[in-house]
Image: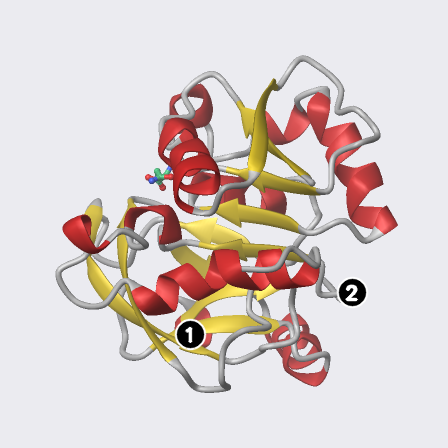
Amino acid sequence: MKVGVVVFPGSNCDRDMFHVLTDVFHLNAEYFWHEKGLPENIDAIVLPGGFSYGDRLRAGVIAAHSPIIKDVKKMAEKGIPILGVCNGFQILVESGLLPGVLLKNESLNFMCEWTNLIVENNKTPFTNKFELNQRIPIPIANGEGRYYVDDDTMKELKKKNQIVFRYSEVVNGSSDRIAGVCNEDYNVVGMMPHPERAVESDINPIDNRPSSLIFESLLTKMGVAR
Ligand SMILES: NC(=O)CC[C@H](N)C(=O)O
C-alpha cells in the first residue's frame, strides 16, 4: 500500500510525517508536489502541517486552490482515507472537503503546547483502534486553530457523528471544544494537533501509545498486519 504526502510551498511538517509513516510504521510513502496530479495507485493521502503560502489571507485558503486538490477530491469521493493535520486540516476545510473553518485562536496567540484529546468517533480509518472517550496526549502548534461552525452545521455534525476529537478542556475557543472532524462518509479526517510529533517515546514525555493508534488504525483499515 502507498500513502501520498502532499507538499505545498510552506509545508514544514511533511518530512516529520514521511519519517513516521515510513520509519516508524513501515509504510510505503511518496511526496506529491501540489502542482502535480495524484496517481491512481495511492491508497491513502496525508496533508501535513505547516504554513502553506505563509498563511496569507487565511491559513489553508490559497493551498485549497492548488491543482492537486482536484485529485484529492476525486480520491475522497472514492472513499480513500485522507488525513489532514493542522495546516492540512485548514486546507481540507478551505477546499470544502470538511465542514467548518479554522479561525485565529481566542487568545490571538500562536499556541505551542501539549493538550489532551478525547476520541468521539472510533469508526473512521484513523480512529478504529481506539475505545470511545479514550484520551490522547498530543501537542498543538498553531495560530489559527479555533474550529468554528454555525449552529445548524453543529447540529448536523452531531447528528451524523462527524466530531472525531474534542479537547478535554477549553484550549483555544473552538466550538464545543472540537479538535477534529470527518466528512459524512468518515473517510476524510482533519485534526489540529500533531500525531506525527507524538508517536515516538523519545519526543513524547507523556505517552506515545495513543497517538500511535491513529496510524495503526490506518494499517488496520488497509489490512496491513502488525
Ligand atoms: N503546525 C502547523 O500546521 C502550522 C499552523 C498553522 N498554519 C497556523 O498557525 O494556524
Local secondary structure at mark 1: strand
Give the residue type at disc 2: Asp
- Colour basis: secondary structure
Residue at the spot x=29%, y=54% of the render? 198
Q: Where is mark 2, residue-wise?
A: 185
> Relative to 86, is 218 above or below?
below
Give the residue type at disc 1: Arg
Q: Residue furthest front?
A: 226
Q: Where is mark 1, residue-wise?
A: 166
Q: CA distance from mark 2 to mark 1?
A: 19 Å
- Which tag, 2 or 1, sits closer to the chain's start? 1
Q: Label 1 neighbourhood size at 10 Å, few (<14), some (14-19), many (20+)? A: many
Residue at the spot x=66%, y=22% of the render? 66
The x, y position of residue 9, in whole percent, is: 47, 16
The x, y position of residue 187, in whole percent, is: 71, 58
Can residue 224 be seen here? yes
Residue at the spot x=70%, y=59% of the render? 223
Image side of residue 100 versus residue 145, left or right: right
Can residue 173 be seen here? no
The residue nearer to you, when weighing 63 against 22, is 22
The x, y position of residue 149, in whole percent, is: 56, 65
The residue nearer to you, when weighing 95 against 84, is 84
> Relative to 217, is 192 above or below?
above
Residue at the spot x=27%, y=62% of the render? 208
Q: Quadrant of ligand 1?
A: top left
Q: Quadrant of residue 137?
A: bottom left
The residue nearer to you, when weighing 190 against 81, is 81
- Dividing the image into 4 quarters, which one contains the N terminus? top right
